[in-house]
Image (cartoon, rainbow, N blue to C red):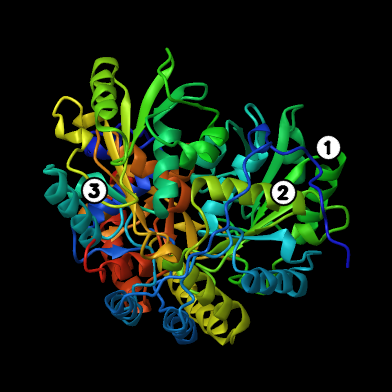
């Protein structure tokens, strides 16, 4: 299978080596098809909970619209710190927290604040390629750490240790993972913490999907382990948990000197997060958490439906222990994932991202999101079936 | 409970001596039209990502206002909504000016200082061999602006034209057809809506590159803020 197939239009082929650009190109193409079913972007389709909407309105009505401090509303920072202590076991207070303009900005600012040219960052492969851009922008170098389907894309401590060089500064952990929906289990996190301490490395722990784990798996924060508080930067946000991606509110927790420096970087690059968004996030954090349970129930139902549907299509996927995705092996179709994704969109009107949009090694995988209603997921599977079967038959012949 | 004060490893060199943020919260009454638009957007469920460039109605209004005021021919496709003018200026500098290069400014360059420090570029009021971008505003001395624009054409310098204080004056560097592809205009709504964090950048042959970089930083600008700005009488 190769990525130079003439069946793929030139404008898709030219960006195929850049995961982020490839995803955006496919989204642009999808916009041409009003009947397309989007199983691409990781944007929850569910409505933002009413109490969060009402809090935003109240903030506007009450005139809470002036610029906030760059590090964020003190009330929100305090609420986040309380959450991180209570739920994640982190030893943090308000001065360990900065509010960011979404989780992606958190990552960008962290890299700008931490990395000098040539510093190496160990990144699990496959990965959300926006990490690449944030690291490269700071002059850092990505060193990929392999993960495998057979191991449910859990991060192996021995693979990390093997990748360490004198230039290694950071281990990046994403749990649950985008794109694989695997998690890094507690036993592995404990071993990774030992490695970080032994080699004097920093751990960046992206926990944006922490609320969505399935089949009894539990989230665990590496920053809670002894000896990790001064070497862990925890990233999280409100977008995925509360279906409020458009508000653009995320946060980072880290030692005080790091947060102070990160605040200066934020002031130089984007300024404070939008005030109304921060008041809405405060309501999300301090108000009822019942919507999360409901979201979880809905996602669990969809996940089961999609797992059964993919199995019926003869496609296997890695164990989706968390997040919103099914990381699906498409090798049996015999065509490269970019072409398959393009055909699924063009002929089937289903937008799915090819695995190579999450790393060059993954041209025989698809990332399929469950962020549509069950009716649409059923329709999507029906549309996919003839295309998958046609190519599998050709491959067999 | 003891909290951690210091990271176990040194921070990046670029953050050493980075200026402290200026804290100057301005409380402004929010126009009724803005409140109405924000509420409409909230009720309509515009609480998810917008597309990468920002919502089309806002981009259209911005380029229409620029075209009307300065007699330009910008297209909405060349505009991107940003998190305030701060992000627009940073993105332009980061993407168009190499580290150790020089940014020339005719008037005050104070709004560029922190970004320039972070990127490692020099700010200067007189040209040197390393100039790659000129920063101009409508408040700069016209004769000096014209001379710098002529040099920008000659040397292929980028021009960052900052109208974040408002669309004033008659002159715009992009009126020169031979310079227009090198001109990025940045602006914001912060003078009337300071905490909503909406700015923009428009024009130039680098528009797509700048948009992609903005996306890599913050994905998109706050949806409600973008819709709310449409409620301003004069975008």
Q: CA distance from mark 1 to mark 2?
A: 20 Å
Checking the image for residue A258, the label placed there is: 2
Crowd class of label 3 (few under 14; some 14 to 19; many from 20; radius 10 Å): few
**Where does the image place residue A341, in percent across and percent down from the top left?**
32, 50
Q: Earlier in the sequence, mark 1 or mark 2?
A: 1
Q: Secondary structure at mark 1?
A: loop
Q: Secondary structure at mark 3?
A: loop
Q: Residue furthest top?
A: B129
The chain containing the residue under callout 1 comes to A
Could you say which is closer to the camera, residue A363 or residue A197?
A197
**Vertical position of residue A191 compared to residue A38: above or below:** above
Could you say which is closer to the camera, residue B87 or residue A224?
B87
Crowd class of label 2 (few under 14; some 14 to 19; many from 20; radius 10 Å): many
Checking the image for residue A187, the label placed there is: none
Whether residue A75 appears in this view of the structure is yes
Q: CA distance from mark 1 to mark 3?
A: 57 Å
**Where does the image place residue A316, in percent across and percent down from the top left?**
48, 57
Q: Quadrant of the N terminus of chain A?
A: top left
Checking the image for residue B168, the label placed there is: 3
The residue shown at (30%, 49%) is B80
The residue shown at (43%, 63%) is B194
In this rendering, which labeled residue sits more in front, label 1 or label 2? 2
Q: Secondary structure at mark 2?
A: helix
Q: CA distance from mark 3 to mark 2?
A: 41 Å
Q: Are marks 1 and 3 on the same chain?
A: no
Report the residue marked by disc 1.
A199
């Amino acid at each position: 299978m190769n990525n130079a197939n003439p069946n793929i239009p030139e404008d898709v082929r030219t960006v195929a080596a850049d995961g982020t650009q490839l995803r955006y190109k496919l989204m642009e193409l999808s916009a041409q098809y009003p009947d397309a079913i989007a199983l691409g972007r990781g944007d929850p389709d569910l409505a933002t909970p009413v109490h969060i909407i009402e809090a935003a309105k109240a903030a506007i009505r009450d005139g809470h619209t002036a610029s906030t401090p760059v590090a964020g509303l003190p009330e929100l920072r305090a609420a986040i710190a309380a959450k991180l202590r209570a739920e994640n076991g982190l030893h943090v207070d308000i001065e360990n927290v900065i509010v960011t303009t979404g989780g992606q900005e958190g990552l960008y600012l962290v890299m700008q604040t931490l990395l000098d040219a040539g510093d190496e960052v160990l990144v699990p492969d496959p990965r959300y390629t926006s990490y690449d851009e944030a690291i490269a922008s700071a002059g850092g170098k990505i060193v990929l750490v392999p993960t495998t389907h057979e191991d449910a894309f859990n991060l192996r401590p021995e693979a990390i240790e093997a990748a360490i060089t004198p230039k290694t500064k950071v281990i990046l952990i994403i749990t649950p993972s985008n794109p694989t929906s695997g998690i890094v289990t507690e036993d592995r996190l404990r071993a990774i913490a030992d490695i970080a301490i032994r080699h004097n490395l920093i751990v960046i722990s992206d926990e944006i999907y922490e609320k969505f784990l399935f089949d009894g798996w539990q989230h665990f924060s590496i920053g809670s382990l002894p000896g990790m508080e001064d070497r862990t930067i925890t990233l999280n946000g409100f977008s995925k948990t509360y279906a409020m991606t458009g508000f653009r509110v995320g946060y980072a927790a880290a030692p005080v000197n790091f947060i102070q420096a990160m605040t200066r970087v934020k002031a130089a690059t984007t300024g404070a997060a939008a005030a109304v968004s921060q008041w809405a996030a405060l309501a999300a954090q301090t108000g009822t958490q019942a919507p999360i349970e409901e979201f979880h129930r809905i996602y669990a139902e969809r996940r089961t439906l999609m797992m059964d549907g993919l199995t019926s299509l003869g496609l296997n996927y890695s164990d989706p222990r968390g997040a919103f995705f099914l990381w699906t092996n498409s090798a049996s179709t015999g065509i490269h994932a970019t072409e398959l994704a393009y055909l699924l969109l063009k002929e089937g009107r289903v937008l799915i991202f090819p695995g190579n949009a999450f790393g060059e090694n993954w041209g025989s995988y698809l990332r399929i999101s469950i962020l549509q209603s069950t009716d649409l997921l059923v329709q999507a599977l029906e549309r996919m079936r003839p295309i998958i079967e046609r190519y599998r038959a050709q491959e067999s012949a | 409970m003891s909290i951690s004060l210091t990271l176990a490893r040194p921070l990046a060199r670029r953050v050493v001596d980075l200026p402290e943020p200026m804290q100057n919260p301005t409380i402004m009454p929010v126009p009724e039209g803005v409140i109405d638009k924000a509420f409409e957007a909230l009720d309509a469920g515009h609480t998810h990502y917008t597309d990468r460039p920002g919502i089309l109605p806002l981009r259209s209004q911005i380029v229409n206002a620029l075209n009307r005021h300065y007699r330009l021919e910008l297209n909405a496709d060349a505009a991107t909504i940003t998190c305030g003018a701060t992000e627009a200026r940073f993105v332009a500098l980061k993407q168009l000016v190499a580290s150790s290069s020089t940014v020339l400014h005719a008037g005050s360059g104070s709004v560029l200082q922190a970004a320039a420090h972070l990127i490692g570029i020099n700010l200067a009021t007189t040209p040197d061999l390393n100039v790659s971008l000129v920063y101009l505003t409508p408040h700069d001395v016209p004769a000096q602006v014209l001379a710098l624009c002529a040099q920008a054409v000659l040397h292929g310098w980028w021009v960052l034209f900052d109208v974040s204080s408002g669309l004033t004056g008659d002159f715009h560097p992009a009126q020169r057809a031979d310079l227009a592809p090198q001109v990025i205009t940045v602006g914001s709504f912060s003078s009337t809506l300071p905490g909503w964090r909406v700015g923009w950048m428009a024009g130039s042959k680098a528009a797509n590159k700048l948009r992609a970089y903005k996306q890599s930083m913050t994905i998109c600008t706050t949806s409600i803020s973008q819709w709310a700005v449409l409620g301003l009488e004069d975008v």
